[in-house]
Structure formats: C-alpha cells, structure tokens
Image (cartoon, rainbow, N blue to C red):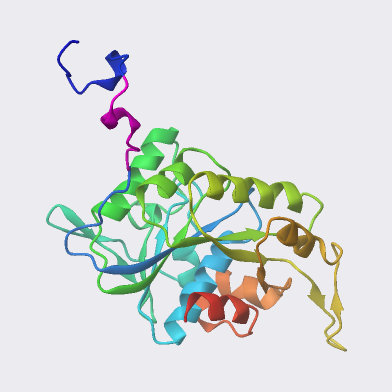
Amino acid sequence: MSECTHDCSSCSQNCSERDEKKSFVEKPHELSNIKKVIGVVSGKGGVGKSLVTSMLAVSANRLGYKTAVLDADITGPSIPKAFGIKEKAQAAGDSLLPVKSKMGTEIMSVNLLLENDAQPVIWRGPILAGVVKQFWQEVIWNDVDYMFVDMPPGTGDVPLTVFQSIPLDGIIIVTSPQELVSMIVEKAVKMAEMMNIPILGVVENMSYVKCPHCDEKIYIYGEGKTEEVAKRNNIKVIGKIPVDPQLSKLCDNGCIELFEGDYLKEAEKILFR
C-alpha cells in the first residue's frame, strides 16, 4: 500500500480521513462577539425578505438586545436604504467597521462600500460568495446578541456559502400567499434540511389588506395557502405582514426603525426567549 499523501482527489483508498465530513464553517473576526445568527431566506425575489430582516432586527433592538444585519444580498442590497444609512463603512487596519443605524443596529452591506448606491454589482457567483465571507470574517461585530443575515433569493452560490460558512442558529423563510407559495417554501425547506439548518418558521408577507374604514382583513391572494404548506412541511407560520403603504413609506424614507404593529409577535416569542 502506498504512503498517504493526504490528497483524497488522487487516491482511491478508503480511510477515516475520507469518511470524515469536512466542515466549511468559518470563524468570525477575532474581535467579534456574536451570540446568535439567524438567516432570512426566500425561494424567489420580491417577497419582502429585506423588510422582514429589518423588522426583526428592529424588534430585537426594542426588546433590549444588541442587533446586527449582514446584508448578503450583494447584487440587490436594500438594508442601508431601509435604515436611512448614507455614510460609508470605515476601515480599521485590515478590518472593516459596520455602520450603526440611528437606534444602534450594526449593518454591513456592499452599498456601504460603493461610491454610488446605484452602481450595479456585476460579479460572478464565486466573487459574490467571497464578499459574504469577508463580511463575516473581516468585519468587527461588537457584542451582538442577534445577527440577521439577509440572503439573496434562491439556492445558488451565495445562499450555499452562508449555509456552509456561517454558523446559523436557524432560518426564517419569507413568502407571499400566491399559488407559487408551495414551490417557494418547499425549495427553501429542502435546502435547509440538506444543510442541517433548523427552520424556525415562515413569515407570510403581503398577507392581506386592511380596509381603511372597517379594519376588515381582505385576502387579495386567498387565505390559508401558507398554513397548508407549512403544516405539510412540519413548520409554523410565525408572522403575517399586510400590504401596508405605511411600511413601504418608512422603508423608502429610511425610517424602518419607526414601524408600528405586532405582525411579528409570534416570531418574537420564538426567537427572543
């Protein structure tokens, strides 16, 4: 038998090293202190993932926790806009410092590094994934109780990198009540199961419209679809957010930290206990 070179790619022998599952989890910056990391995912774009991420961070902040948002949606970053952040991230030697929102949430996004917010990020998947890892490894996150990772939609390079490289304590799936909901949720569920990431629940955005005159809930896309899919996959619906022009206005004006409403009360009970 030939001597082991530790290069499994050129070896046909079975051994203990080949059988061991390699961990791709990366350590954060040596000066960072992060207690819990929650990923916010969706199977498709445009369902309000960044809105839910922002609202969860604000909710945790209001409960007295120190919060942070790692914006992993490199090609479609919207977190700085929602929080009204216009200043750029600063370097500290070879490291980066996150920018703090008005209420103290630490934020890192590619838009905090670009000269122009409207500048498109035209990079291939591996480079995008590498930037996310840099945000985890090279940013100094200070005493964070809850970090929320706003992930791009789908199951491509960047979500895979987050699932493999960042030690997630769980994910929240964001969806909308259209007919596509079953496919959207089930794709995200299956990916999480394959990566052994706990699913904390589903948040349904654009769930209903409230009548301005009588407060009746009008389910413009139908009612109960998300609950059916969640039950089929043994997960819970932990929040329902209506179509609310006020929420959109707060995001557009960079004032998401002023949102009102108890739409995420069930999510708060599960996450912040």
Visible residue check, residue 3: yes
Residue placed most toward the observer, 33 or 96:
33
Query: Against 138, is 58 above or below?
Result: below
Residue at (79%, 61%) from the top-left corner? 228
Residue 150 in the image, given as x and y percentages of width and height: 48, 58
Residue at (63%, 84%) from the top-left corner? 262
Query: Against 143, is 153 above or below?
Result: above
* Identity of the residue furthest to the front in this view: 1
Query: Against 179, is 108 above or below?
Result: below
Residue placed most toward the observer, 110 or 137:
137
Residue 19, magenta (yes or no): yes
In the drawing, does residue 185 fall left or right of residue 138?
right
Residue at (26%, 74%) from the top-left corner? 143
Residue 74 in the image, given as x and y percentages of width and height: 44, 48
Identify the image quadrant of residue 246: bottom right
Visible residue check, residue 255: no
Q: How many marks?
A: 0
Residue 204 in the image, given as x and y percentages of width and height: 69, 65
* Identity of the residue furthest to the left in this view: 93
Residue 3 in the image, given as x and y percentages of width and height: 14, 15
Quadrant including the N terminus: top left
Query: Against 22, is 251 above or below?
Result: below
Magenta segment's dominant SS is: loop
Residue at (87%, 88%) from the top-left corner? 213
Residue placed most toward the observer, 80 or 191:
191
Identify the image quadrant of residue 209: bottom right
Give the residues in magenta. 14-23
